[in-house]
Amino acid sequence: GESVGLHLPTLSVQEGDNSIINCAYSNSASDYFIWYKQESGKGPQFIIDIRSNMDKRQGQRVTVLLNKTVKHLSLQIAATQPGDSAVYFCAEIPNAGNMLTFGGGTRLMVKP
Amino acid sequence: EPEVTQTPSHQVTQMGQEVILRCVPISNHLYFYWYRQILGQKVEFLVSFYNNEISEKSEIFDDQFSVERPDGSNFTLKIRSTKLEDSAMYFCASSPGPDDQPQHFGDGTRLSIL
């Protein structure tokens, strides 16, 4: 269940630092966005979502920012921990549909 | 916390054989999905299912694929005559509703076609 073989961009951070993972989406008609985390051997795990009428949403230790003007989404993880090491995907759903379109993913590596 | 469960975790099948992948969605969810991830590629949408019928499908979901909800808890994906290129991870997902409801994924079935 991992993106083995994908040429994933990799973000390497020190434990305790903040992480920012970026995503560019393509469909200007998309109005709902989700960040997923995928650990080795597992399926995508829901982290946080945001609707297009918002530009920021916060969860526990995570914040998602949406910039519709440049079609950009980011995920901020505060005080990154070794357990945060995984591949992170953004996904979008266009208006009036429920088909998730996934981005290519970013591998986050947390150094203890 | 409720979760989507998939069986088997790994399925090995001869080319041309039929295969059925099984999923138990989260119990109060009404929308069900199948996705696949070919090794080295992105997760791709196959099909969504609601109220006992397909609500949306991708170009990948051709006549060799079918889905079924045979009872109140299971959701299956059948591939009628498997090809080598069907080898992939297949993920089932479910959501409480459409439109702005997060889809929750199982841990997938790795399908290997020989």
Image (cartoon, helix red, strand yellow):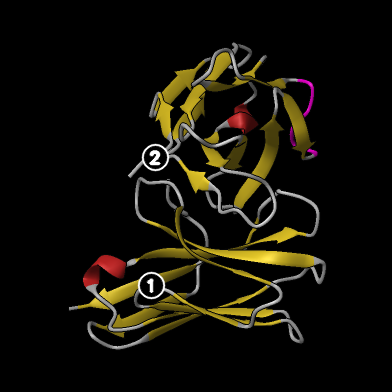
CB of mark 2 within 8 Å of CB of mark 1?
no
Q: Are marks 2 and 1 on the same chain?
A: no
Q: Residues within 10 Å of mark 2 (few under 14, many from 20)?
A: some
**Dot 2 corresponds to which residue?**
B3
State the CA–CA distance, disc 2 to disc 1: 24 Å
Rendered view: B29 above or below A54: above
Q: Position of residue A38 (x, y in %)?
A: 42, 56
Tell which of B47 and A10 is nearer to you. B47
Instruction: Looking at the picture, tell me which residue is in the foreground, A54 or A68.
Output: A54
**Quadrant of residue B54 in the image?**
top right
Q: What stretch is highlighted in magenta?
A: B59-63
Q: For the point 69% across and 31% down, which residue is it? A: B50
Task: Indicate left or right for B1 with A6 as reference.
Answer: left
Relative image position of residue B37 (x, y in whole percent): 56, 44
The residue that mark 1 highlights is A108
Q: In which quarter of the image is residue A55?
A: bottom right
> Residue placed at 61% from the left, 37% from the top?
B33
Label 1: how many residues lie within 10 Å, few (<14), some (14-19) or many (20+)? many
Of helix, strand and loop, which one carries label 2?
A: loop
Question: Where in the figure is residue B34, as x and y percent of width and height?
Answer: 60, 36
| Residue B114 in sight from this viewpoint | no
A69 vs A79, left or right, is: right
Q: Say what amino acid the circle numbered 2 marks.
A: Glu
Q: What is the residue that sits farthest to the front in this orientation?
A: B28
The disc label shown at residue B106, or none: none
Element under disc 1: strand
User: Does B15 appear in magenta?
Assistant: no
Disc 2: which chain?
Answer: B
Q: Is residue A110 left or right of residue A37?
A: left
Q: Is residue A10 above or below residue B98?
A: below
Return the chain for callout 1.
A
Q: What residue type is labelled 1?
A: Leu
